[in-house]
Each structure stands twice: as C-alpha cells, then as structure tokens.
Image: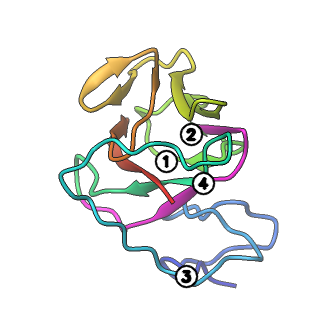
Amino acid sequence: MVCPNCGAEITRSMRFCAECGTKLDAGQSTVSFAPSFGDEVESPAPSGGGPGGASLIELDQVEGTAGRRMHDIDDSVVTVGRGQDSSIFLDDVTVSRRHAEIVRGDRGFLIRDAGSLNGTYVNRVRVDSVDLRNGDEIQVGKYRFRFVYA
C-alpha cells in the first residue's frame, strides 16, 4: 500500500504517513475545497444555535513548503500535536506531543494551548486561549493554518 498524498509505503495499521504526516483513513475523500479569503476576516457563526463545520487549511510552512492539506474540525475537541493519538498530527520537533486543542462551543470555536513549550500563535500573537474567527492564521511549530467556517 502507498500513501495517497506522497506515495510512501504504508501498512494497514498506520494511522499517519511516516513521510508526510497525512492522516490515513479508509474513507478518505477526493473532494477539493477552495475557500475565498477576501477582506472580511470575521464571519458570524451559522444560524441554528451553534457553530457549523469548520476547517484548518494548511498554508506553506515557515521553513520549506508543504502540500495544501485541509483538516476538518468535526469533533467537539480536536487535538493538535506530535503525538500519534492527535487528531491533527504535526511531525516537527518544535511541536509538543499534545500541543493545542480546538474546542467547539455554543459561541463558536476556541483554540487553547495545552501547555506546549513553544506556544500556540493566532495572527502572530502567542495565546493561551482565544476565540477563533473566520480567516484567523494559526501557527503551531513550523506549521501555519487558516481557520475557515465550511
């Protein structure tokens, strides 16, 4: 078997590709997503009581380049880190095993640092916990993401 993202050899027991970090699932989709990042940086949460779906879109890494990957925020708590049990796996020594969490609440989405050594940044400001707005840039280690409502 090979990784659908980079073509590296993988086994059925692997949850992430050892070469590129892509999450491996039997039900991966081939749907593309091309969001528009206009001048508007804040968008109200969709109607219906709580927030709608959201995603993190990987931008170019601070050092080097990365393929554009999209990470859906489907669960009430999405973990970000270098640990194999992380919802969003980031293979970088500057990323803690359990680096940050993105939490879905009644008012929208919140990101909080999970006690990482190098910190979590939103719009280039180090944060402990902050509400996310459409278009926010999140940096964890050398990885940068754009937060968007789907």
- Residue 76 pos. (x, y %): 72, 39
Q: In the rendered image, which residue does mark 2 sit on? A: 82
In the depicted structure, whether residue 48 falls above or below residue 24: above
Crowd rating for badge 2 (residues with CA inside 10 Å; few <14, some 14–19, many 20+): many
Q: Mark 2 vs mark 3: which is more N-terminal?
A: 3
Which kind of residue does numbered mark 4 sit on?
Gly
The residue under label 3 is 31
Q: Look at 55% across and 82% down and name the residue there.
A: 31
Question: How far, Cα to Cα, is label 1 from label 3?
Answer: 24 Å
Look at the image and give the residue range highlighted in magenta. Answer: 65-79
The residue carrying mark 1 is 91
User: Could you say where residue 97 lies in the image, as x and y percent from the top left?
Assistant: 59, 31
Marks 2 & 1, CB-CB < 8 Å contact: yes
Q: CA distance from mark 2 to mark 1?
A: 6 Å
Q: Which x, y percent locates residue 29? A: 64, 80
- Label 2 or label 1, whichever comes before in sequence order: 2
Q: CA distance from mark 4 to mark 3?
A: 16 Å
Name which residue lies at 51% across and 77% down.
5
Q: Amino acid at mark 2?
A: Arg
Residue 16 drawn at (x, y percent):
64, 60
Viewer-nearest residue: 123 or 86 = 123
User: Mark 2 and mark 4: span between their CA atoms?
Assistant: 24 Å
Q: Return the residue at label 4.
A: 53
Q: Which colouring convention does the figure follow?
A: rainbow
Residue found at x 57% / y 81%: 4
